[in-house]
């Protein structure tokens, strides 16, 4: 397995708000485990950071099987945020993740705002973690099981509660399943989010015509992969032009050209997710491709980010 030459990384170094990263590529939570699992399959140095598998206060079994089904140009999943809880995370998983040598981001999930706040307080003094990411797509038990990320008032309260318990940078991972992302994004910033991650999976469905039942254990599931890229790109551009905040663009980034599109649209970081299951070393190709593009066009990464010039008319 080859590695990108260290000298080439100079062009990829970037500041994502308070985070200093060797490259803009960030392994997306839920697609990269705790990082070490991928060490035999990819060049981990190509990732500026690794967002770890979600962690909750208590262990979660997740949803019943089947939980994944392939779709044209994508994948539906209803894993249910399965994890072993904060105690196992601290005793075992975090040490495993540190072995990657990459900056680490913890992804927090909960049923109530207080769950997130408690997790933030527990993790605040863990020097192994560079930042905390708030998964705002979870059902909110205190508000009729609606998603935290669909109500500006609730998202502001959620992010604010986490920020009160930590000195680490807080990333708000927002759901794209809303009519307008801007009010939600503004509320997350007002609550104290230093970075936005736009976004997460889109709700989808798959039916077996033979049984007329869902192919999954739930009616609806999260769609990721190539199919959502144009939708995710649009959301990133809307936020980048309407807000002054660092953005991680996530959704269907498979090729170098996909990564370049998100950078041009205004994303300073690139969430690399579903492609890790198919081409685990694609991050290396993306890094090489971005470096070549910058050299060919005599640009810096700062010049490229947000350089969209508008329509062809």
Image (cartoon, rainbow, N blue to C red):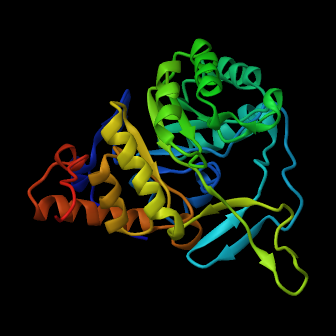
Left or right, 303 with respect to 279, comes to left
Q: Which is nearer the eye, 89 or 71?
A: 71
Residue lying at 16% horizontally and 48% vertically, measured from the top left: 300
Residue lying at 58% horizontally and 50% vertically, measured from the top left: 200
Left or right, 307 with respect to 166, comes to left
Within the image, what quadrant is residue 247 found in?
top left
Residue lying at 50% horizontally and 69% vertically, measured from the top left: 226
- Asked if residue 252 shows in the view, the reply is no
Q: Quadrant of the N terminus?
A: bottom left
Q: Quadrant of the C terminus?
A: bottom left
Residue lying at 65% horizontally and 52% vertically, measured from the top left: 30
Where is residue 18? Give x, y as percent: 37, 26
Q: Which is nearer the eye, 256 or 23?
A: 256
Q: Which is nearer the eye, 264 or 98?
A: 264
Q: In the figure, 110 relative to 165: above or below?
A: below
- Asked if residue 183 shows in the view, the reply is yes
Left or right, 217 with respect to 133, comes to right
Q: Which is nearer the eye, 109 or 154?
A: 154
Query: Of all residues shown, which one is farthest toward the left?
Result: 298
Where is residue 136? Give x, y as percent: 64, 36
């Amino acid at each position: 397995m080859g590695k990108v030459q260290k000298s080439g990384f100079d062009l990829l170094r970037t500041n994502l708000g308070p985070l200093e990263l060797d490259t803009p590529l960030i392994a997306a939570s839920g697609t990269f485990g705790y990082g070490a699992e991928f060490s035999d399959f990819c060049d981990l140095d190509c990732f500026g950071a690794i967002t770890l598998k979600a962690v909750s206060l208590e262990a979660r079994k997740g949803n019943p099987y089947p939980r994944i089904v392939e779709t044209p140009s994508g994948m539906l999943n209803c894993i249910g945020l399965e994890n072993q809880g904060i105690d196992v995370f601290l005793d075992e998983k975090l040490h495993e993740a540190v072995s990657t040598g990459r900056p680490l981001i913890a992804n927090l999930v909960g049923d109530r705002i207080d769950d997130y706040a408690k997790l933030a307080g527990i993790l605040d003094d863990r020097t192994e973690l560079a930042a905390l990411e708030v998964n705002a797509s979870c059902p909110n038990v205190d508000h009729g099981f609606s998603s935290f990320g669909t109500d500006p008032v609730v998202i502001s309260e959620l992010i604010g509660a986490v920020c009160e318990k930590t000195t680490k940078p807080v990333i708000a991972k927002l759901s794209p399943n809303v009519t307008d992302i801007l009010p939600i994004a503004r509320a997350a910033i007002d609550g104290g989010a230093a970075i936005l991650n736009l976004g997460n999976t889109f709700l989808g469905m798959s039916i077996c015509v033979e049984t007329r039942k869902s192919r999954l254990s739930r009616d609806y599931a999260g769609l990721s992969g190539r199919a959502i890229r144009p939708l995710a790109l649009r959301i990133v551009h809307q936020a980048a032009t309407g807000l002054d905040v660092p953005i991680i663009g996530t959704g269907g980034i498979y090729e170098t050209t996909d990564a370049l599109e998100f950078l041009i649209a205004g994303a300073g970081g690139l969430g690399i997710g579903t492609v890790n299951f198919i081409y685990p070393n694609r991050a290396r190709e993306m890094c090489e491709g971005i470096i070549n593009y910058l050299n060919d066009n005599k640009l810096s990464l700062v010049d490229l980010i947000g350089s969209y010039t508008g329509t062809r008319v």
